[in-house]
């Protein structure tokens, strides 16, 4: 379970927002990807995954941004699978990479 504070990086967040955000993190962790539907940038939807290094730690992220008008169609045509495949190729090149060494 994630522990979230009501103040992050100097910004106050209502507990109701934090509860919703915590649920989004749990869902993203369960399905293996996160989706942003114009939440941080008007006119851009995105799907992102974590990239893990050789020791299994998250060392980077990979995301694909798509205009909202095309996102659903591309998502349903297999976007998550394509991003998972790209992640596998990147991680294969990081098998010997261990963060902090």
Image: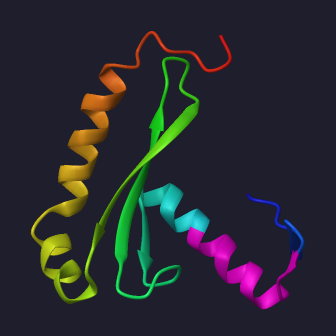
Who's the residue at 25% across and 81% down the image?
67
Q: Position of residue 93 (x, y in %)?
A: 32, 19
Residue 81 left/right relative to 24:
left
Q: Quadrant of residue 73?
A: bottom left
Q: Name the one closer to the observer, 85 or 40.
A: 40
| Image mark count | 0
Which of the image's four quarters has the N terminus? bottom right
Residue 95 in the image: x percent, y percent? 41, 15
Q: Relative to 31, is 73 above or below?
A: below
Q: Quadrant of the C terminus?
A: top right
Magenta part of the protein: which range? 11-24
Does residue 14 appear to the left or right of 45 in the view shown? right
Residue at 25% x, 51% y is 83
Q: Residue 89, percent across and down?
A: 25, 30
- Report the front residue among 101 and 92: 101
x and y, in percent, of residue 70 in the image:
16, 82
Instruction: Please tell me which residue lies in front, 62 or 78.
Output: 62
Residue, far left: 77
Residue 57, located in which quarter of the rendered image? top right
Residue 80 on the magenta segment: no
Foreground residue among 94 and 77: 94
The residue located at (57%, 15%) in the rendering is 98
Above or below: residue 101 compared with residue 78: above
The residue positioned 18% from the left and 51% from the top of the image is 82
Residue 51, image quadrant: top left
Q: Main secondary structure of the magenta part?
A: helix
């Amino acid at each position: 379970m994630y522990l979230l504070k009501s103040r992050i990086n100097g910004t106050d967040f209502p507990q109701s927002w934090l509860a919703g955000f915590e649920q989004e993190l749990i869902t993203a962790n369960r399905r293996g990807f996160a989706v942003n539907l114009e939440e941080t940038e008007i006119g851009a939807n995105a799907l992102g995954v974590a990239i893990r290094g050789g020791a299994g730690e998250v060392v980077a992220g990979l995301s694909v941004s798509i205009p909202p008008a095309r996102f659903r169609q591309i998502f349903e045509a297999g976007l998550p699978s394509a991003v998972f495949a790209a992640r596998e190729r990147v991680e294969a090149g990081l098998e010997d990479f261990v963060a902090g060494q």
